[in-house]
């Protein structure tokens, strides 16, 4: 028995869809046997039951043309639920009795032709696709990780890995071992390390990083500070490597495509070209293994004069020599004077520019082993450009045939 309220038109006609008030429709077992079924209608106003009509079947009465598919998709594309779940799924606040209602909502979980799975979408374009307006997925387990694996390959995303300690996020690409990439609880990122000590730390046994971009540079910057490493800088031309430490300007250090190093210059003309002052704390060793210990060494000059000869007669007091040296280099200071004789102890002195003023505060007595003095008269020890040195024999002694004079100076 099924009760329905109907609307009757002016001619007393009405339409009724049997089973429309039940979630399961008409019981299918009514039509399972070959017995005839009759339809009777009894009004509730007390009138007699109307004549019963025998029910007959037509080709489309028990199975609709769309019964094998739903929305063009086969039954295998949808999940099945138990009868209790089905009843609960069909109920809501607007439909408390659980009757079936037509809706345009998206199927929560859809299997599309058995090859693609969609969650939150009826039209997945990938093998697995999830769509949603907010957080679309959450995966939780005791180990707190999601794993993708195939024969010999594995990738694991973990929020707290045993090997990586209390990491907020970690990735490992091997079946065993530890995380290759990790973000710890302090927000520090570690690549090749499980204990990063900085906001970003990379550790490895070989080449640990490579950075490439259209501009070909790596830049580190903070307010007021800037450092750029570039393999081809606009300001530096075709430089293989350049460093600049300011936001603007040009590279302070450059290695060009010929391997020449420029410091303070973008166009080095030598293997090392420095535009500015340079300080060396140590020795400069040349290709012939000679060593320059200080810049003063490079400024030292020596002046040598030979008076007489081994086969000459003995020197006389009159064997003076004018202009034994002319300064054409630059201003210099006399530091030391030495005098060697082949025999005896003749005494000598030196003067400047033809004057009679001695440069040495006292006459120097020469000897075969060499006599030395560093004491010069006030103001006489500086040789300017164009100054001349004169040699004076004070006392020859009648024994020495040869005297060698050596003057050591330093460029000012």
Image (cartoon, grey):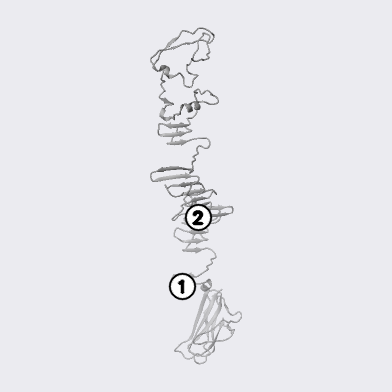
* Residue 174 image point, x, y percent: 42, 48
Tag on residue 229?
2
Q: Tell me: residue 161, above or below residue 4.
A: below
Q: In which quarter of the image is residue 334?
A: bottom right
Q: Is residue 104 among the parts visible in the rendering?
A: no
Q: Tell me: residue 199, above or below residue 62.
A: below
Q: Residue furthest right?
A: 378
* Residue 339 image point, x, y percent: 51, 84
Tag on residue 32?
none
- Could you tell me which secondary element the residue under label 2 belongs to? strand
Question: Looking at the figure, which quarter contains the C terminus?
Answer: bottom right
- Could you tell me which secondary element the residue under label 1 belongs to? loop
Report the residue at 52% width, 73% height from top: 297
Report the residue at 45% width, 31% height from top: 110
Task: Return the disc, 2 or 1, that comes first in the chain's sequence.
Answer: 2
Is disc 1 surrounded by few (<14), some (14 to 19) or many (20+) residues within 10 Å? few
> How far apart in space, not on screen, are marks 2 and 1 (Cα)?
36 Å
Asked if residue 198 lies left or right of residue 77, the reply is: right
* Residue 98 image point, x, y percent: 51, 24
Report the residue at 46% width, 73% height from top: 290
Q: Tell me: residue 343, above or below residue 381.
A: below
Tag on residue 290?
1
């Amino acid at each position: 028995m099924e009760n329905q309220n109907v609307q009757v038109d002016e001619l007393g006609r009405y339409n009724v869809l049997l089973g429309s008030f039940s979630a399961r429709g008409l019981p299918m077992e009514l039509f399972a046997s070959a017995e005839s079924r009759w339809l009777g209608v009894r009004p509730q106003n007390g009138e007699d039951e109307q004549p019963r009509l025998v029910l007959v079947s037509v080709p489309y009465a028990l199975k609709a043309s769309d019964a094998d598919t739903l929305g063009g998709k086969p039954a295998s594309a949808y999940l099945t639920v138990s009868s209790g779940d089905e009843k609960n799924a069909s109920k809501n606040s607007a439909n408390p009795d659980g009757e079936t209602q037509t809706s345009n909502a998206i199927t929560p979980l859809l299997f599309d032709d058995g090859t693609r799975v969609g969650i939150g979408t009826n039209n997945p374009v990938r093998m697995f696709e999830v769509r949603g307006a907010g957080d679309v997925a959450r995966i939780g387990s005791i180990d707190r990780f999601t794993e993708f694996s195939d024969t010999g390959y594995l990738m694991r995303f973990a929020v707290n890995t045993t090997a990586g300690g209390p990491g907020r996020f970690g990735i490992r690409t091997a079946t065993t071992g530890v995380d290759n990439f990790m973000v710890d609880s302090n927000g520090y990122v570690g690549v090749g390390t499980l204990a990063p000590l900085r906001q970003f730390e990379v550790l490895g046994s070989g080449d640990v990083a490579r950075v490439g971009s259209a501009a070909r540079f790596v830049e580190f910057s903070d307010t007021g500070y800037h450092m750029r490493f570039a393999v081809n800088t606009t300001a530096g031309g075709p430089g293989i490597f350049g460093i600049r430490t300011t936001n603007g300007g040009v590279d302070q250090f450059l290695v060009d495509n010929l391997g020449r190093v420029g410091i303070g210059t973008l166009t080095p003309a030598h293997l090392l070209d420095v535009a500015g002052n340079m300080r060396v704390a140590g020795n400069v060793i040349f290709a012939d293994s000679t060593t320059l210990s200080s810049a003063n060494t490079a400024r030292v000059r020596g002046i040598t004069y030979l008076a007489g000869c081994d086969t000459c007669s003995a020197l006389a007091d009159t064997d003076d020599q004018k202009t034994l040296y002319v300064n054409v280099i630059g201003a210099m200071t006399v530091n030391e004077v030495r005098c060697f004789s082949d025999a005896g102890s003749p005494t000598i002195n030196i003067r400047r520019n033809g004057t009679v003023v001695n440069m040495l505060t006292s006459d120097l007595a020469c000897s075969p082993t060499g006599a030395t003095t560093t004491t010069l008269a006030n103001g006489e020890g500086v040789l300017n450009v164009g100054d001349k040195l004169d040699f004076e024999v004070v006392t020859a002694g009648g024994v020495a045939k040869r005297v060698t004079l050596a003057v050591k100076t330093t460029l000012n």
